[in-house]
Image: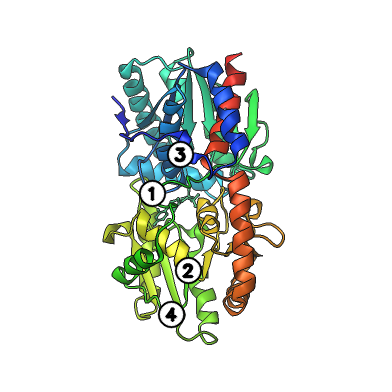
């Protein structure tokens, strides 16, 4: 059996007045046609990273609309997740190739998971597969009754061919694929229905719900942040594509100009992300002697509410990625009206537009300049943040994502 992720109920009605009305109205109409359909989301981990963040909010909303939805996890040991992390990196263009034994690990674990899926013997009309970890299940489960959809959250515009050739045959069994940007669609994709739309954040989740100022302040003091000092934050998995060391270097350039500036680097360590531990150790070693740099993780209790407080309270949020699928953390910060300095990669420019949201950067130097500029110009920073929030409201809240998914399911069922 695959593990089912237990999630509570959510009601779309509570999004009235928060998300745009036209999206909520369109959702009810579209859901009418799909009522009673059964839908499964398959992913690798229940926490840590964007996919779990999205599914925790999205899955209950299907159920609220009368579409039965489950979220299940594939199993895997450390070696499997080391291999899938290499596949993830290879699909984002990292060099190298899997060895024969690594390929065998991927296949053997995928076969086991396919058997578990078959053993569940549930009839789904639609199966969404998130990212490359569960990708082979469409083929290996032999289930041709469901419509299979691959939701690729990463930048696959220039995949390393050796990784792409390994996975491409499994895509033949998919009916549809979804990418965040047009340019992420890999060359020669053998799938009939290809859609391009970005993910979204949940404005009503504990991470994004408005926090009263005194509570936010208490939460931050509790985790060692001094609320009378300025603060710059990056929230990311510890991953080299997120460039935490680049953030440290940019911060060190700004510090002589703003001597009491604090930096918070917040990262969760996920079970499908073994490289994260090495990256974490590297960041810790480089920053341990600086009392104004706070390296915080889920392991010391920094969870959704703490991230919420950090994103809301920071003077500037940074997301200095070198590759990025979308970067939910950018939308999360903007939703709180906090301006963002973001790497000009992947989905970040979708969120930081001309004169809205923040500043796009291409290097450590530009990142430092942009941080300093926003710290010195608080009125401009506030205005950018406010515009960014409205952009997020229109384009990157959960009802819009659900609507895009339902449109696709509607097409696939006709
Ligand atoms: N996140 C978190 N705690 C952390 C690091 C990340 O809650 O210490 C969350 C973050 O708030 C966001 C998600 O994990 O919701 C990361 O999504 P994003 O799209 O930014 O990056 P991904 O990890 O999917 O590459």
CA–CA distance between discs 3 and 4?
A: 36 Å
Q: Earlier in the sequence, mark 3 or mark 2?
A: 3
Is residue 347 visible to us here? Answer: no
Residue 280 on image: x %, y %: 37, 63
Please state which of residues 228 and 157 is positioned toward the viewer in this rendering: 228
Residue under label 2? 314
Residue under label 4? 229
Q: Residue at x 44, y 21 (%)?
A: 66
Asked if residue 384 lies left or right of residue 399, the reply is: right
Q: Quadrant of the N terminus?
A: top left
Q: Is mark 1 within 8 Å of ligand 1?
A: yes
Residue 212 on image: x %, y %: 40, 61
Of marks 3 and 4, the one in the foreground: 3
CA–CA distance between discs 3 and 2?
A: 28 Å
Of marks 1 and 2, the one in the foreground: 2
Residue under label 1? 48
| Secondary element at tag 1 | loop
Mark sitting on residue 14 = 3
């Amino acid at each position: 059996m695959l593990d089912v992720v237990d999630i509570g109920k959510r009601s779309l009605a509570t999004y009235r007045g928060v998300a745009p009305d036209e999206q909520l109205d369109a959702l009810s109409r579209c859901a009418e046609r799909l009522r009673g359909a059964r839908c499964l989301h398959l992913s690798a981990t229940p926490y840590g990273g964007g996919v779990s963040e999205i599914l925790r909010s999205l899955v209950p909303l299907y159920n609220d609309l009368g579409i039965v939805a489950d979220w299940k996890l594939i199993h895997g040991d450390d070696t499997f997740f080391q291999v899938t992390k290499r596949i993830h990196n290879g699909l984002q263009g990292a060099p190298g190739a899997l060895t024969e034994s690594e390929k065998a690990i991927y296949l053997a674990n995928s076969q086991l998971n396919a058997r578990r899926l078959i053993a569940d013997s549930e009839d789904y009309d639609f199966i969404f597969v998130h990212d490359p970890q569960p990708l082979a299940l469409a083929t290996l489960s032999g289930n041709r009754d469901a419509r299979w959809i691959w939701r690729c959250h990463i930048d696959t515009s220039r995949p390393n061919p050796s990784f792409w050739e390994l996975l491409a045959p499994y895509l033949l069994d998919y009916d549809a694929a979804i990418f965040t940007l047009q340019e992420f669609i890999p060359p020669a994709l053998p799938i009939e229905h290809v859609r391009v739309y970005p993910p979204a954040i949940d404005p009503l989740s504990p991470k994004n719900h408005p926090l009263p100022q005194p509570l936010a302040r208490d939460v931050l003091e509790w985790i060692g942040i001094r609320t009378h000092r300025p603060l710059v934050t990056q929230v990311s998995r510890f991953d080299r594509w997120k460039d935490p060391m680049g953030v440290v270097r940019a911060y060190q350039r700004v510090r002589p100009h703003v001597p009491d500036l604090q930096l918070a680097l917040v990262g969760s360590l996920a079970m499908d992300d073994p490289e994260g531990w090495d990256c974490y150790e590297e960041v810790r070693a480089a920053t341990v002697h600086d009392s104004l740099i706070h390296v915080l993780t889920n392991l010391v209790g920094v969870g959704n509410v703490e991230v919420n407080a950090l994103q809301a309270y920071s003077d500037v949020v940074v997301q200095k990625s070198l590759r990025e699928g979308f970067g939910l953390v950018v939308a999360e910060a903007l939703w709180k009206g906090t301006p963002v300095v973001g790497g000009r990669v992947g989905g970040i420019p979708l969120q930081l537009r001309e004169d809205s949201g923040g500043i796009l950067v291409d290097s450590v130097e530009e990142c430092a300049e942009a941080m300093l500029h926003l710290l010195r110009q608080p009125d401009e920073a506030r205005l950018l943040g406010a515009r960014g929030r409205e952009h997020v409201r229109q384009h990157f809240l959960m009802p819009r994502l659900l609507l895009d998914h339902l449109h696709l399911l509607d097409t696939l069922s006709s």
